[in-house]
Image (cartoon, rainbow, N blue to C red):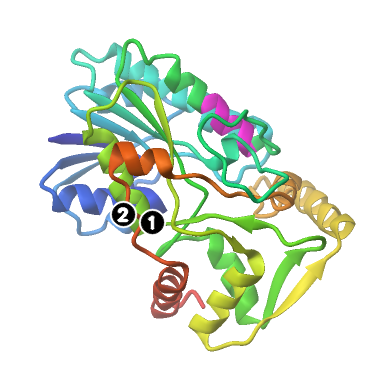
């Protein structure tokens, strides 16, 4: 089996590549950097330098592959235009390359995000049929990416997966959060508690592979996440326990958060760099992010096996072992 993984040298992509190679796949990885990154020493992997904004490079990668895992995407950017250029237009380029291939791949699996449907005002789990209401440029760009994929459902066999926050070894997203906990504080927006689902990368990777190998109607969308829903206080407590630290909640007023985010965006534009905090990220933090994984259980035999405490402990151990904390 020959697989193409876009974003293969990144956090989720590298874990997926390792799993595919362990299964005996020949893997082609599209990566922006010429360095192997997390793929160092993994064989047989062919690394192709380029990104999803280059249709020419994509056409060369897609020819001859059996399946495509489109994992590449931006979670932070210098502005909305960059999100849409990579997450929406770039996804369209991947779809176009698959359609133009001499022998189209058997399956295209697109890694979207729960941000594509937006948060809920209530903590009740949301299913795949929920009306999309993204609240950030990132969320809108991922929804547009989904539209690019689903538009081709009659010509390609496509599947879309929507995880919530994904964490695990190599993740830089919750790493910033863990650094705050290391200092003894759990930063939380003021107001009522918000609940969220999380997904360990060790659970997400089998779901991606199942989406590529299970006989499914083209165009299916699945929510994938770990068991349970948690407040940010509970997530912070799990990180503190893993580090042997008793962190205290630090409730941040919303005007302060939006002001800091606007300042960070302005400074990022001046420096020409993406910022971790943005007004879109603040808006995302003000709702509930709980998803119903019943459909994935039924169709993909999805069985999350990593609980919050174990997943956080594994992640923290990796951070400590690699000098990130």
Query: Which numbered disc flags the more N-terminal residue, 2 or 1?
Result: 2
* Residue 276 is a magenta residue: no
| Count of all numbered marks drawn on residues in the image | 2
Q: Which residues are magenta?
A: 138-145
Mark 2–mark 1 distance (CA, rounded to whole Å):
7 Å
Q: Residues within 10 Å of mark 2 (few under 14, many from 20)?
A: many
Find residue 222 and report its horizontal and vertical position in percent.
Answer: 42, 36
- Closer to viewer: mark 2 or mark 1: 1
Helix, strand or loop under label 2: helix
Q: Residue at x 70, y 78 (%)?
A: 185
Residue 61: % across, % down? 26, 28
Q: Secondary structure at mark 1?
A: helix
Q: Position of residue 137 (x, y in %)?
A: 67, 35
Look at the image and tell me in which quarter the N terminus lies: top left
Give the residue drawn at x 37%, y 16%: 153
Seen in the picture, residue 166 relative to 318 is either above or below; the reply is: above
Q: Is residue 201 left or right of residue 3?
A: right
Give the labeled residue for mark 2.
Answer: 15
The residue nearer to you, when weighing 8 against 120, is: 120
Image location of residue 323, percent across then percent down = 45, 78
- Look at the image and say whether residue 140 sits in the magenta stretch: yes
Check if mark 2's residue and mark 1's residue have beta carbons within 8 Å.
yes
97 above or below 17?
above
């Amino acid at each position: 089996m020959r697989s193409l993984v876009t974003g293969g040298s990144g956090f989720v992509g590298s874990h997926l590549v390792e799993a595919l190679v362990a299964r005996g796949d020949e893997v082609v990885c599209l990566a922006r950097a010429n360095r192997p990154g997390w793929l160092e020493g993994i064989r047989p992997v062919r690394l192709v330098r380029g990104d999803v904004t280059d249709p020419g490079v994509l056409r060369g990668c897609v020819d001859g592959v059996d399946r495509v895992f489109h994992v590449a995407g931006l979670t932070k950017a210098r502005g909305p235009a960059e999100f849409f250029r990579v997450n929406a237009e770039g996804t369209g380029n991947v779809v176009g390359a698959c359609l133009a291939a001499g022998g189209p791949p058997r399956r295209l699996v697109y890694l979207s995000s729960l941000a594509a449907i937006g948060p809920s005002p209530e903590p009740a789990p949301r299913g795949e049929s929920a009306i999309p209401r993204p609240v950030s440029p990132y969320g809108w760009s991922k929804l547009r990416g989904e539209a690019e994929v689903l538009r081709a459902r009659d010509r390609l066999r496509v599947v879309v997966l929507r995880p919530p926050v994904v964490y695990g070894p190599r993740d830089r997203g919750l790493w910033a959060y863990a650094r705050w906990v290391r200092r003894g504080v759990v930063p939380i927006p003021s107001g009522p508690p918000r609940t969220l689902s999380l997904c360990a990368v060790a659970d997400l990777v089998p779901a991606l592979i199942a989406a590529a190998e299970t006989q499914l109607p083209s165009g299916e969308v699945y929510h994938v996440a770990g068991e349970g829903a948690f407040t940010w206080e509970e997530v912070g407590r799990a990180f503190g326990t893993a580090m042997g630290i008793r962190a205290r909640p630090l409730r941040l007023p919303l005007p302060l958060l939006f002001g800091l985010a606007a300042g960070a965006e302005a400074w990022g534009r001046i420096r020409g760099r993406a910022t971790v905090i943005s007004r879109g990220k603040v808006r995302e933090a003000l709702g509930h992010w709980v998803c119903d994984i019943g459909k994935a259980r039924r169709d993909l035999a999805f069985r999350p096996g990593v609980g919050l405490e174990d997943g956080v402990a594994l992640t923290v151990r990796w951070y400590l072992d690699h000098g990130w904390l």
